[in-house]
Amino acid sequence: MRLTDLLSGSPFRTSAKVAIGVLVLMCLGGSLFIWSATQALRDTTEQQTLEEAVLLSDIYSSEGREGLVKAIGTLSDLVNNQERVSAVFDEKGVNLAGADLAMPDFIGVRDTTLQSVAAGVSAGRFVLSVQKYTDATLAVGRSLKSVDEMRVHMIAGLIIMTVLLTFGTLVLGLLASGESFSKLRSIEGVLARVASGESDARVSIVERKDQIDEISIQINANLDALSRLMDSMRATTTAIAHDLKTPLARVSLVLNDALDEIDAGGNPQPQVEQALNETGALNEIIDTILRITRIRAGSPRNDMQLNDIGSLIENTVEFFTPLAQESGQTIAFLPGEAGNSQLQCDKNMVQQMLANLVGNAIVHGGPGISIRVRLEDRPEWLDLVVEDAGEGIPSGQQHDVFDLFKRIDSARSKPGSGLGLALVKAVADHHEAAIALSQTNSGSADHPGLKVTVSFPKSELQQ
């Protein structure tokens, strides 16, 4: 694993951004904290200076200049002039007692460097309070050395902590990037194996810790779906080859018969017409397969329009009535109590679905049966029901009839390709509708009938 791979990883780039954020926040927050802390200590030093100045002022008020000179002389002998200074000057600026200072050129409180005021006093910053009286001037000060030292220590600590946090964040980012890169390489390897034909390869997931693990789970789910689709495609391809082989063989035989008829000097027209009928049936099968494939591939749902499904049912029933009457069957549309039959749908697809369902009932239901098409209104669904009183489909085979070219044993002697209900299922899935098969009359062993219910969600309805 190369360092450039780790540095280009998303976790490291994220940690780098976090490190920059930490650096900026530490600088801003640390600077504010240091300023606040040093300012508080400086204010405390100033307060102590003012308190001492007040005490000396009280001495001046009670004992006059002589008492003040005496007090400052005594105080200078007791304290360290490196940390605290005090001096008293007469009205001409002559230093009468205390530290060897020239009289300051200001009145009030100020941070100043005593080295610049009078030579011979240690360098350093002081808070100096200067008060002027009638015949004297009082100067009292305290060193800011501890404040400056604390500022230096705090700045050093801030720098060290910022460096450690930034470095630690980057190291953690590198570790996370390495872990993510390993997972991504694993995913890449699995996808390469799948691409090479190893359809059962899956991403190993030890524990669900991060988004890559969640993505890996989704990849495995998609690979499972892809594997099922590939298996379905193989089965469909096999079924197509098997079901098209017989009619193609019949066309070949019929054309050979036509050639024999020509050689014998006869009329080959019947054989040619039969061959055309067979190729027409083949074209119909291929067109249906292509239609199912396009629907399953997902045509745009935003092209759907509002249609009256009741009107589509009426047109379908009217179209198939003559065919049903030829077999002595009756067909009727029962609108029911559906208050709103407006459906946002693909009109051609739904019309094809209705034609397949009604045509399937006519062909496989048997002579003399009744066929009913109904609409049933439920709170969240609009049900399209097509039911007949024919032979029905055994419950154990009801799920299989939605597969391509799937025909139950009782239907093999009747015309059809086994694609009708597969197309119905594809149209239902495209409209997010549920489809279910059941018996119309479960109490009859000979004619249980077939009831097909397609439930459209009312989210597709125009309220």
Image (cartoon, rainbow, N blue to C red):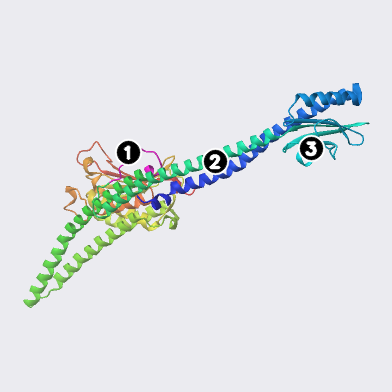
* First-in-chain label (1 vs 2): 2
Q: Secondary structure at mark 3?
A: strand
Q: Give the crowd class for mark 1: few <14, some 14-19, many >=20 residues within 10 Å.
A: few
Q: Residue tagged by mark 1?
A: 206
- Amino acid type of the residue tagged 2 in the rendering: Thr
Tell me the number on the disc at residue 117.
none
Q: CA distance from mark 1 to mark 3?
A: 68 Å
**Residue that lies at the very extreme toward the top in this rendered image:** 62
**Residue that lies at the very extreme toward the front in this rendered image:** 120
In the displayed structure, does residue 431 sit left or right of residue 442?
right
Q: Residue tagged by mark 3?
A: 110
Mark 1–mark 3 CB contact (< 8 Å): no
- Can residue 92 be seen here? The reply is yes
Q: Secondary structure at mark 2?
A: helix
- Amino acid type of the residue tagged 1 in the rendering: Val
Residue 262 % position (x, y) = 9, 76
Q: Secondary structure at mark 1?
A: loop
Residue 161 % position (x, y) = 54, 38
Q: Give the crowd class for mark 2: few <14, some 14-19, many >=20 residues within 10 Å.
A: many
Residue appearing at x 47%, y 40% in the figure: 168
Tell me the number on the disc at residue 162.
2
Majority secondary structure of the magenta segment?
loop
